[in-house]
C-alpha cells in the first residue's frame, strides 16, 4: 500500500505542478477544468490511505485495529487512481509540460525583459534635450518608468503569475519606448510632410466650400423647397469647419519645431474638420446632381425599380413562393406607380420621389433575400 501511494504521489506531483502553473498563469483554463474531477477522485484515495496510516490512538497508545481487506482495498483504490492519472497525462501531456515550462521560464524571461528595459531607457535618455522634450518621448519614458516600477515590485514579491503579467507589460512598454526613441530624430520631417499635405487639402476644400452657396442657390432656384429643406445651413457649417481647420493648421505650424507631436495632433484635428466640411459640400452638390438626373428623365429612374420588381416576381414564380411573396411584390409595384403619379404638378417633389423609390428598391431587395434564404433552408 505504501509503494502504491508513493507511485501515486510522484505522478500527482508532476501533473499538479503543470495544472497549477496553468491556473496561476491563466494560460490553459481547459486543462484546469479537465483535471478538477480527476483531482477529486485521487484525493479521495489519498484520504483513505492517510486514514489507514494514522498514528495509534492518542489516549491508549494502542494501534488502531485494521483488517487485511482494508489495506487491500486501499491499495486497489490507489492503483486505480494511478491508472486515472496515467490516462489523464497521456491525453494532456503537451499541455501539462507546456505549463510547467512556461512557469519555469518566467524568472529567466523577467531577467531578459529587465535588461531590454534598461537598454531602452538608456537610449531614450541619451537623446538630445530638444528631442527628449517631445511629448511622445516624455510620455513613453513616464509610462515605461511606471511599468518598470510595477515590474520590480512583482519581481521582489516572487509571485510567478504577477511577475508574468508585469513582464508582458514591461515588454510592451519597452517596445513602445524603443519605437518612439528611434522615430524622434525624423519626427519633425515626418510632421512637416503631413503639414504640407493638409495645407494642400485645405486649399482644395476651400475652393469647394466657396462654391457651396452657388450650388445651394441653384437648388432653391431649380427645385421646390421640399427638395432641400434638410440641407439648410450646410454652407455656413462648411465655412465654419474650414475656418476651424485653418486654426488647427496654424497651431500645427507654430508648434512644429518645439513639439512635433503636438503639431501632429493639431494636423489630425484639421483633417477631421476638413472631412466634415467636405461632407457638407457633398451633401449639397450630390443632391443637386441627383435631382437634375431625376428631373431629366423621372420615368427612367422608376424603370430601374420596376425592372427590379419584375425580376423579383419572376424569382418568386421560379422558386414556387408566389403564395408567400406575390402579394407583397404586387403591393410594391402599386406603390411605385403611385409615386410616379404623385410627381405630376407645378412644383414636383423630386427628392421625395427619389427617397420613395429608394425605399421601394430596398424593400424589394429584402424580399429577394428572404426568398433566397428560404430556398437554401
Image (cartoon, helix red, strand yellow):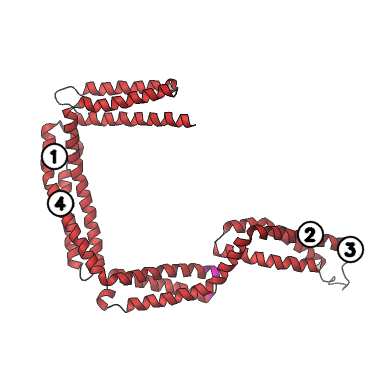
Question: Circle 2 is placed at which residue position?
Answer: 77
Where is residue 253? Give x, y as percent: 17, 65
Which sits in the foreground, 267 or 59?
Answer: 267
x then y, percent, for residue 71: 85, 63
**Which is more N-terminal, label 3 or label 1?**
3
Q: Give the structural element (helix, strand or loop) at label 3.
A: helix
Of residue 265 and residue 56, the one placed in the foreground of this image is 265
Residue at x-position 18% and y-position 27%: 297
Residue 241 is inside the magenta segment: no
Mark 2 nearby-residue class (10 Å; few <14, some 14–19, many ≥20) = many
Q: CA distance from mark 1 to mark 3?
A: 103 Å
Residue for badge 1: 216
| Number of the front mark, 1 or 4 | 4
Observer-side mark, 3 or 4, equals 4
Q: Quadrant of residue 316?
A: top left
Q: Which range of residues does the magenta coloring cover?
A: 157-162
Query: Marks 1/4: CA distance?
Result: 19 Å
Q: Contact (CB < 8 A) between labels 2 and 1?
A: no
Q: Position of residue 118 (x, y in %)?
A: 41, 77
Give residue 68's mark.
3
| Horizontal arrangement in the rendering, residue 196 relative to residue 102 (left or right) | left
Check disc 1: other Cα within 10 Å, few if <14, some if 14-19, many if 20+: many
Q: Which tag, 2 or 1, sits closer to the chain's start?
A: 2
Mark 2 vs mark 4: which is more N-terminal? 2
Q: CA distance from mark 2 to mark 4?
A: 84 Å
Query: Closer to the observer: label 2 or label 1?
Result: 2
Q: Tell me whether the residue at label 2 lies in contact with that at label 3, contact meaning CB atoms closer than 8 angstroms.
A: no
Give the mark nearest the N terminus, 1 or 4: 4
Q: Secondary structure at mark 4?
A: helix
Q: Classify mark 4: residues with Cα within 10 Å, few (<14), some (14-19) or many (20+).
A: few
Please, what secondary structure does the residue beneath circle 1 have? helix
87 or 279, which lies in front? 87
Amino acid at each position: 500500500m505504501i509503494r502504491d501511494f508513493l507511485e501515486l504521489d510522484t505522478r500527482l506531483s508532476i501533473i499538479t505542478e503543470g495544472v497549477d502553473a496553468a491556473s496561476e498563469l491563466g494560460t490553459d483554463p481547459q486543462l484546469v477544468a479537465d483535471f478538477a474531477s480527476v483531482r477529486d477522485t485521487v484525493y479521495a484515495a489519498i484520504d483513505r490511505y492517510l486514514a489507514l496510516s494514522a498514528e495509534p490512538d492518542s489516549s491508549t497508545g494502542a494501534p488502531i485495529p485494521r483488517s487485511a481487506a482494508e489495506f487491500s482495498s486501499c491499495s486497489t483504490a490507489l492503483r486505480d487512481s494511478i491508472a486515472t492519472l496515467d490516462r489523464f497525462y497521456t491525453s494532456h501531456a503537451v499541455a501539462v509540460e507546456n505549463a510547467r515550462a512556461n512557469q519555469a521560464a518566467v524568472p529567466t524571461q523577467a531577467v531578459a525583459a529587465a535588461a531590454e528595459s534598461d537598454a531602452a531607457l538608456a537610449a531614450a535618455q541619451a537623446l538630445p534635450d530638444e528631442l527628449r522634450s517631445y511629448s511622445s518621448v516624455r510620455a513613453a519614458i513616464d509610462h515605461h518608468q511606471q511599468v518598470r516600477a510595477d515590474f520590480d515590485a512583482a519581481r521582489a514579491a516572487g509571485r510567478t503569475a504577477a511577475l508574468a503579467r508585469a513582464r508582458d507589460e514591461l515588454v510592451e512598454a519597452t517596445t513602445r519606448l524603443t519605437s518612439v526613441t528611434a522615430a524622434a530624430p525624423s519626427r519633425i520631417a515626418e510632421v512637416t510632410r503631413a503639414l504640407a499635405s493638409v495645407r494642400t487639402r485645405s486649399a482644395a476644400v476651400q475652393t469647394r466650400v466657396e462654391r457651396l452657396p452657388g450650388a445651394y442657390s441653384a437648388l432653391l432656384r431649380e427645385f421646390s423647397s421640399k427638395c432641400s429643406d434638410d440641407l439648410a445651413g450646410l454652407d455656413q457649417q462648411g465655412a465654419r469647419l474650414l475656418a476651424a481647420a485653418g486654426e488647427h493648421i496654424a497651431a500645427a505650424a507654430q508648434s512644429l519645431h518645439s513639439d512635433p507631436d503636438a503639431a501632429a495632433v493639431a494636423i489630425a484635428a484639421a483633417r477631421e474638420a476638413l472631412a466634415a466640411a467636405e461632407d457638407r459640400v457633398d451633401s449639397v452638390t450630390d443632391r443637386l446632381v441627383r435631382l437634375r438626373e431625376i428631373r431629366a428623365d423621372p420615368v427612367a429612374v422608376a424603370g430601374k425599380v420596376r425592372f427590379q420588381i419584375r425580376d423579383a416576381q419572376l424569382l418568386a414564380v421560379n422558386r414556387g413562393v408566389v403564395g408567400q411573396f406575390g402579394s407583397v411584390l404586387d403591393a410594391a409595384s402599386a406603390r411605385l406607380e403611385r409615386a410616379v403619379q404623385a410627381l405630376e404638378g407645378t412644383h414636383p417633389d423630386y427628392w421625395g420621389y427619389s427617397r420613395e423609390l429608394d425605399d421601394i428598391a430596398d424593400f424589394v431587395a429584402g424580399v429577394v433575400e428572404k426568398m433566397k434564404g428560404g430556398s437554401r433552408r
